[in-house]
Image (cartoon, rainbow, N blue to C red):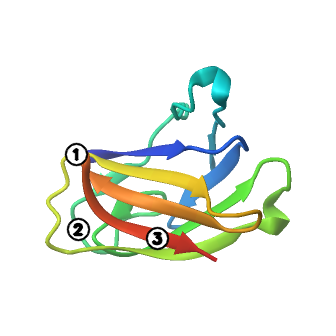
C-alpha cells in the first residue's frame, strides 16, 4: 500500500481527514521555512481499490474534510476527490493551499506526476 503525503502550503495550520477517518494536523509553513510544506506527524494510506476503509484514500470517490485549526471543526468543509480508477499508485501527494480568504484548493499527484487539481468550496 502506498502512503498519502499531505502538505499544507499555507501559513495557517489545518486539520485534515479522509473518508471520515481521524483528523490529522497539517502544520503551516511560512517564509522562514522558504514556503516549503512541512510534513504531518503521520500519513494516511492509499488503497489501490474502490471503497477504502475509513481514514484511507482509494480509487474512485473519496471525501476530504478540513478546517483551520484556529477556527475549529464548526467551520469544516468537505469535498469529493475522485481518484481515476486507472491510477496505479506509487505514492500519492495532496498539496493544499488557500485560493482566497475563504476557499481552499488542492493538487493531487502520483509519484510527483500531476493527476488533477481540486477546488474546495
Label 3, label 2: how far apart the Cα atoms are: 21 Å
Residue that carries the numbered disc 1 in the rendered image: 111
Residue highlighted by disc 2 = 49
Which residue: 37% across, 59% down? 108
Residue at position x 84%, y 67% in the image: 74
The circle on residue 21 is: none
> Are the residues tagged 1 and 3 within 8 Å (C-beta)?
no
Secondary structure, mark 1, is: loop
Where residue 29 appears, x then y in whole percent?
63, 33
Mark before the other along the chain sequence, 3 or 2: 2
- Residue holding disc 3: 118
Single out the residue that lies furthest toward the top. Answer: 32
Residue under the image location 66 percent in, 31 percent down: 30
The answer to whether marks 3 and 2 mark residues whose Cβ atoms lie closer than 8 Å is no
The 10 Å Cα crowd at callout 2, few under 14, some 14 to 19, many 20 or more, is: few
Q: Quadrant of residue 12?
A: top right
Residue 78, quarter of picture: bottom right
Crowding at dot 1, Cα within 10 Å, few <14 / some 14-19 / many 20+, comes out as few
Measured as percent of width and height from the top left, residue 119 is found at 53, 73
- Position of 31 relative to 70 (above/below): above
Please state if 95 lies on the left or on the right of 67 as rendered. left
The kind of secondary structure element at disc 2 is loop
- For marks 2 and 1 on the same chain, the one whose residue lies earlier in the sequence: 2
Spatial separation of the CA atoms under disc 2 and disc 1: 18 Å
- At horizontal 79% and vertical 61% (from top left) the residue drawn is 73
Disc nearest the viewer among 3 and 2: 3
Nearer-N-terminus badge (1/3): 1
- In the image, taking residue 107 as reference, residue 39 lies left or right, namely right
What kind of element bears circle 3? strand
In the figure, 87 relative to 109: above or below?
A: below
Q: In the drawing, does residue 117 fall left or right of residue 103?
A: left
Amino acid at each position: 500500500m502506498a502512503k498519502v503525503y499531505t502538505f499544507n502550503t499555507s501559513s495557517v495550520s489545518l486539520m485534515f481527514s479522509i473518508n471520515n477517518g481521524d483528523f490529522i494536523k497539517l502544520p503551516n509553513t511560512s517564509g522562514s521555512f522558504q514556503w516549503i510544506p512541512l510534513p504531518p506527524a503521520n500519513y494516511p494510506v492509499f488503497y489501490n481499490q474502490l471503497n477504502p476503509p475509513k481514514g484511507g484514500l482509494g480509487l474512485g470517490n473519496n471525501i476530504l474534510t478540513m478546517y483551520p485549526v484556529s477556527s475549529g471543526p464548526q467551520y469544516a468543509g468537505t469535498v469529493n476527490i475522485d481518484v481515476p480508477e486507472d491510477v496505479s499508485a506509487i505514492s500519492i501527494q495532496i498539496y493544499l493551499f488557500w485560493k482566497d480568504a475563504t476557499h481552499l484548493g488542492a493538487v493531487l499527484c502520483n509519484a510527483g506526476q500531476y493527476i488533477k487539481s481540486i477546488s474546495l468550496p
